[in-house]
Amino acid sequence: MNICKINSQRRAVSQIIGSIFMLAVVAAFGSILMFQGIQGSNDFTAFLNFFNKGQGEAVKEDLLITHVKFDPNTYHVNFWVRNTGSIDVIIDRITIVRIDTQSLIVSNKTSTSVMQIFVGETERIDLSGGSTVSLESGCSNWSDTTDCTMADGRYRISVVTSRGNAFETVAQPFNT
């Protein structure tokens, strides 16, 4: 009987107050861990965005190569490029390759003169001069048919932008 008397005199924390106290402790530690996790994921996303800053803009580029003209009396090549994207484009390189022989006709790095095409605008590109266009040996112009097969070929015209996008078309002299 003494034992029952001792137990009845001691007071204890009720179960409800104990549960509320435990909930407060767990909620405090949980919120600390959650905010640390969110901060860590934000830091990682910012780190990735730092390196891929230009990649998002590269998707907005879109060029259309139109009206290719091989001048029959010379070795000039003219074509028009229209910016149909939603961002201004800077042309970095222009190449023309003969498809059947894979010979490089034009390899023009435009770093000396920046060629920028604004949104919605069309620019004419004139490739002329002996240093730019390399015809086959024995050819004096695009329509020369004596010892030259330049007029019979098909050519892949590629325009590469400063963001690394390539836009291509295929053309044939006097049939474009």
Image (cartoon, helix red, strand yellow):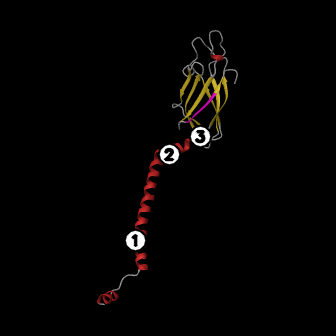
Say which mark, if any, is on residue 67: none
Q: Is residue 44 above or below residue 133?
A: below
Query: To which quarter of the image does residue 152 belong?
Result: top right
Q: Secondary structure at mark 3?
A: loop
Tell me residue 130's x, y (percent).
56, 19
Residue name at image x 55 percent, y 41 percent: 58
The correct choice, above or below, for 103 with respect to 21 in the image is above
Q: Is residue 114 left or right of residue 24?
A: right
Per the image, label 1 sits on a secondary structure element best described as helix
* Residue 168 among magenta residues: yes
What amino acid type should be assigned to the residue bearing mark 1? Val
Q: Indicate left or right for 146 with 25 as reference.
A: right
Residue type at mark 2? Answer: Lys
Residue 25: image tag: 1
Asked whether 49 or 94 is in front, the reply is 49
Q: Which mark is on residue 53? A: 2
Give the class, few, some or many, for how many residues have Cα within 10 Å of label 2's Cα (few <14, many ≥20).
Answer: few
Q: Does the residue at mark 1 contact the one at mark 2 (Cβ under 8 Å)?
A: no
- The stretch of residues the image draws in magenta is 165-169
Q: CA distance from mark 1 to mark 2?
A: 42 Å
